Image: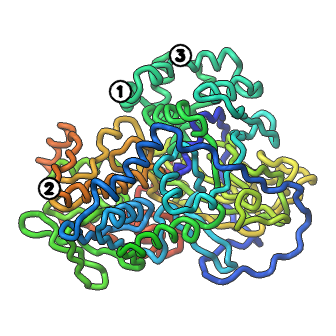
Amino acid sequence: MRSFLSAAAVAAFLSAGVRGYSSFVPRSVRPSSSSSASRPARARSFSRSNLVMKDFPKPNLEDTDNYRFAESMSASFGKALKATAEEKKKVAIIGGGLSGLACAKYLVDAGHEPTVYEARDVLGGKVSAWQDEDGDWIETGLHIFFGAYPNMMNVFAELGIHDRLQWKVHKMIFAMQELPGEFTTFDFIPGIPAPFNFGLAILMNQKMLTLGEKLQTAPPLLPMLVEGQSFIDAQDELSVTDFMRKYGMPERINEEVFIAMAKALDFIDPDKLSMTVVLTAMNRFLNEDNGLQMAFLDGNQPDRLCAPMVHHIESRGGKVLTSAPVKEIVTNDDGTVKHLLLRSGEKIVADEYVSAMPVDIVKRMTPKSWQNMPYFRQFDELEGIPVINLHMWFDRKLKAVDHLCFSRSPLLSVYADMSVTCKEYEDPDKSMLELVFAPCSPLAGGNVNWISKSDEEIIDATMGELARLFPTEIANDPDWPATSGQSPQGQARLSKYAVVKVPRSVYAAIPGRNKYRPSQTTPIPHFTMAGDWTSQKFLGSMEGAVLGGKLAAEVVANRAKGNAEKPIKEIQQNIVDAAEKHVPTEPVGIKGEGGIAFGAGAQLSGTAEKLLKESDPVQFVQMA
């Protein structure tokens, strides 16, 4: 879930084990298929849960320096950056994910006229969702909102939709690896300020690390609190494992702490993840009283989050268009943007242009005349990380908690029973688990390219993990060989599932990559870059996407006022040298339709899989 969930795991003291997968053909369970049909009547179930969904009041999110800065920046669009009639610009934004929508939102606030061109028939990018033939919502990712998301929380406040967040009790819940079926928690005591609430929550937990191990973890992290961002940035060349060993932290802390932290932060194992990512997240949560408190959206993202953003944009003179894929960025002889060419053949001419596309898509769209510029060669060092989001419906209720759970599984990062955490998906009779399956590739430290595996293989491997998490509940089901060790006590059977593959999700935060994240300002006049992967102080996440779009809007609005350009971030010398040697070619462009083609996620059909094999063959390399 950095997925966009990721930041939650900064304090997740978890561990990992080993489990393989089986190749087989299931016999009876029904996979989900996309549709907009309405939900049929639910059949009577075998059991009813006595768990009652309970939401908690919105915590105090506003009394932090980060929130005050986000609020002040938002206000500047209606004040210092507000355009006069003569300064008003027509802005074309490529991409209708959170970053593109946020950019458009703040541009209309500044008096400009943005139009968002989204290639797909749904908005949201990596937070998009759609309905299957039963009317059930299929989400690209399991998305959790944190108190330490100041720009996202500011958007909720500005749109007046805070009531759509279901805040959960301030705690973190973990599955116990040594005690299958058992859970343990980090409980945050109300009234205790950060960072003491965080430290106390860990110290009070007696089921995970020993006191000695907890104390050994602290000293290497003290420079983060004392030196701040300069120390955090300096650790980007080290993996989490390298950092741990450099400072003499015991191996058990890696097993109990950093494996799960890394997986939840960026779907990556600790020997592959930059320590800067971990420290950035920890620094946020250690300094905000309610930074780790979590909320679920009360329903599907298109209706409950994207729609209010669209209404705000369009009610102030902007436009948001779906099914409007950009085929090519057409340039003049001097390299400036001449127009955008849509697949329909329509030419879009604007005063300003903003790319809010994922980095892997931008690389395929970069015009030939830009390819020798060091700014664009930085993108060679960045790529999206694969992740898989699962929806699994069961024929009865599983033991559940009204919260996010950290699975402590080698294949699963986090999960939630959406039937007890989300109002729209509430069901007192049956469970629907949404799970993040990671790591998915060698890039992330895995030993299997799971994107290339069949849905059935992925679900079987997951059923094996769920059998460990729910040992007395999951049935021994011949459809799923990984459950063969279950006792007759287990009765819950899978009735339906959906596998959403995201071959290129958030940028892979492997060591040494942070310095290549580009500024929103580009060397191309009137062309600006947005996206969670661009340079900003938060992780590639929902918060990072909103901030990336907001910063891009600031660049455009500032330029319209005739102010000095925001500076371009320093580019590394190795990139400058590589740019000189690069042989430019015509941009590859984007083939096909749907989420996979445009850098998001989808239930992989035969046609989409064929296109993915052509455009991203590394996803299908079989490991020895």
Question: In the image, residue 139 lies at what x, y percent?
Answer: 59, 65
Of residues 61 and 237, the one nearer the viewer is 61
Q: Residue 157, relative to residue 308: is it above or below?
A: above
Mark 2 → mark 3, Cα distance in angstroms: 48 Å
**Left or right, residue 441 beside residue 28:** left
> Where is mark 3, residue-wise?
219
Name the image quarter holding residue 618. bottom left
Looking at the image, residue 429 sits to the left or right of residue 110; the answer is right
Tell which circle, 3 or 1, labels the residue nearer the N-terminal end. Answer: 3
- Element class at badge 3: helix
Residue drawn 41% across the image and 79% down it: 323
Q: Amino acid at mark 2?
A: Val
Indicate the position of residue 348 as horizontal and vertical percent values: 24, 78
Q: Nearer the viewer, mark 3 or mark 1?
A: 1
**Looking at the picture, does residue 335 appear above or below residue 195?**
below
Residue holding disc 2: 583
Tag 2 or tag 1, which sits nearer the N-term?
1
At 64% from the left and 55% from the top, the residue drawn is: 296
**Amino acid type of the residue that numbered disc 1 sits on in the rendered structure:** Ser
The answer to whether one can see residue 622 in this image is no
Query: Label 3: few (<14), some or many (≥20) within 10 Å?
Result: few
